[in-house]
Image: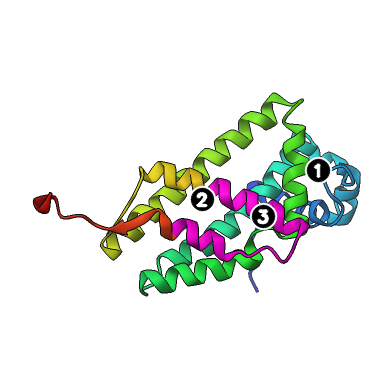
Amino acid sequence: MTQTRVSRAERQQQTRDRLVEVATQMFLDVGYSGTSLDKVAVEAGFSKGAVYSNFAGKEELCMAALDTIHAEKIRLVHEMFTEDTSIETRLKSFVEWSRSGLGEPRWTALEVEFAAVARHNPWVASELVKRHREVRRLIAQLISATVEDAGLETTVPVEHVATALLAVGAGLGGLRALDPKIDMDVFGDVLAGLVRPRRDPAAQ
């Protein structure tokens, strides 16, 4: 039986993936301050040196963990807005997702705690800004494609809609982390209020 040799690059990627997997769970369970590189290394089955060979420090490791969380949430939202269903059904699915996808206590707490690090760490601040801009860009793309497909248009520039939705989502997420009874339907209401039937230029 022939065994497939794993290259050094593949082993390093496997190590990195394992560290991010363990760190993500640990950051969610005990928070940023409660997580140490020593604990992550031990839980993942590696030495602390393995952590430093893949990440410059805890900030970079936490950023990678948040990237993993964000990628999954963006993937789910993208699936909802690209379904072959009516705009009403897509919005309903989106609001249903927001009930569990926004304001999950552990994720929200980690986001807030890590954002506080940005006050004293320019690298963290700049990386968070880059990621927020990318999320807004992806949201704008989804909205543009969705309204075009549905024969609608936005009442304000689509970039403003994306910014508004990101802000409302973050705000509702924070509120919901404290008060689970917050009505998440407001998220869909805000989005619905920012679109309208497409106007016929010839009729103007």
**Range of residues picked out in magenta:** 165-191
The residue positioned 88% from the left and 56% from the top of the image is 43
Query: Horizontal placement of 72 versus 124: left or right?
Result: left
Residue 202 visible, this angle: yes
Classify 176 as above or below 12.
Answer: below
What is the number of the mark on residue 173? 3
Mark positioned earlier in the residue sequence (2 or 3): 2
The foreground one among 9 and 59 is 59
Q: Which residue is mark 2?
A: 165
**Tag 2: residue type?**
Leu
Q: At numbered mark 1, what does the secondary structure look like: helix, strand or loop?
A: helix
Query: Horizontal placement of 183 versus 57: left or right?
Result: left
The residue positioned 35% from the left and 42% from the top of the image is 157
The residue positioned 71% from the left and 54% from the top of the image is 175
What is the number of the mark on residue 50? 1
Please identify, in this view, whether the residue under mark 2 or under mark 1 is nearer the observer. 2
Name the outermost residue toward the front. 204
Q: At numbered mark 2, what does the secondary structure look like: helix, strand or loop?
A: helix
- Look at the numbered discs 2 and 3 and tell me whether their residues touch, using CB distance below 8 Å: no
**Tag 3: residue type?**
Gly
Give the CA separation, mark 1 to mark 3: 35 Å
- Residue 118 % position (x, y): 72, 31
The foreground one among 88 and 33 is 88
Q: Main secondary structure of the magenta part?
A: helix
**Colour pattern:** rainbow
Residue 167 location, quadrant: top right
- Look at the numbered discs 1 and 3 and tell me whether their residues touch, using CB distance below 8 Å: no
Tag 1: Cα neighbours inside 10 Å, few (<14), some, or many (≥20)? some
The residue positioned 49% from the left and 61% from the top of the image is 189
